[in-house]
Image: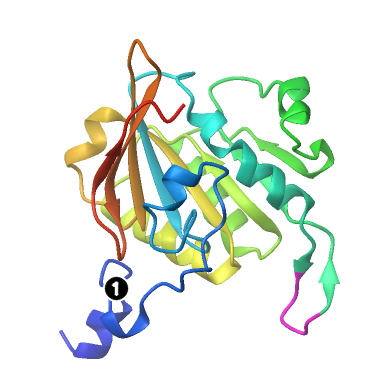
């Protein structure tokens, strides 16, 4: 394999292209931002959130950033400002509760819910949404996500300047992934702990009772 081909792999981190300290999207949780190389969620990249069950704080963790994205003006390559990008939900296991989202500051007019027929259509829908350049963020709940599929999502996020968030079961922890960031959420009696399993340019760590 040539060096050029190797460097095209999204899992290869190059020391000469370190993440700018201001390049991250603020999460709304300063403790988390301090542990992420860009000072926040990695933009134009795939983030994986591993959970044992739904409703342990995984959406609450994203709400400040999603609210910001739903209100921000998008900037085109020509420098012109346009309407905020869509926040796409692909195959959510529940119907998003509009009043709660609105209370968190999310602009409901920017919400887009996609209900694919199966997992292959789910991944295709997410990839198209990410690469379109019209979605600020794409949330997806795939049943499976192999290494090849995660690479495609990562590349689509880069192409469309979008943020991909894939929710996966805890069993996916040992599976390879091209995601720039992988988190694992664990519910305890005191709250929800966030384990940073993988962070491009960063290091694993545990944030106790972040939520």
| Residue located at (27% from left, 66% from top) | 11
Q: Does the magenta stretch include residue 78?
A: yes
Query: Is residue 123 positioned above or below 187 on the image?
Result: below
Q: Tell me the SS state at disc 1.
A: loop
Query: 155 or 23, which is in the foreground?
Result: 23
- The residue that mark 1 highlights is 9
Query: Is residue 27 positioned above or below 52 on the image?
Result: below
User: Quarter holding the N terminus?
Assistant: bottom left
Q: Is residue 207 left or right of residue 167?
A: left
From the top left corner, tell me how far across and down residue 116 is, in percent. 57, 35
From the top left corner, tell me how far across and down residue 33 is, in percent. 46, 51
Q: Residues within 10 Å of mark 1 (few under 14, many from 20)?
A: few
Q: Does the magenta stretch include residue 3?
A: no
From the top left corner, tell me how far across and down residue 28 is, in percent. 58, 43
Query: 23 or 106, which is in the foreground?
Result: 23
Q: Which residues lie in the magenta part?
A: 75-79
- The quadrant holding residue 142 is top left
- SS majority, magenta: loop
């Amino acid at each position: 394999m040539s060096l050029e081909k190797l460097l095209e792999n999204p899992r290869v981190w190059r020391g000469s292209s370190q993440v700018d300290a201001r390049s991250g999207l603020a999460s709304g949780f300063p403790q988390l931002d301090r542990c992420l190389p860009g000072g926040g969620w990695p933009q134009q990249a795939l983030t994986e959130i591993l959970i044992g069950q739904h409703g342990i704080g995984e959406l609450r963790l994203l709400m400040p950033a999603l609210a910001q994205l739903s209100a921000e003006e998008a900037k085109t390559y020509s420098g012109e400002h346009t309407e905020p990008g869509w926040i796409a939900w692909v195959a959510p296991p529940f119907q998003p509760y509009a009043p709660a989202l609105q209370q968190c500051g999310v602009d409901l007019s920017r919400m887009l819910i996609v209900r694919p027929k199966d997992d292959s259509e789910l991944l295709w829908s997410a990839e198209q949404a990410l690469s379109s350049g019209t979605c600020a963020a794409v949330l997806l709940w795939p049943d499976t996500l192999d290494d090849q599929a995660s690479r495609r999502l990562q590349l689509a996020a880069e192409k469309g300047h979008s943020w991909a968030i894939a929710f996966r079961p805890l069993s996916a922890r040992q599976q390879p992934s091209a995601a720039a960031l992988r988190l694992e959420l664990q519910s305890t009696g005191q709250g929800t702990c966030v384990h940073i399993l993988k962070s491009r340019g960063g290091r694993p760590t545990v944030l106790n009772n972040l939520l």
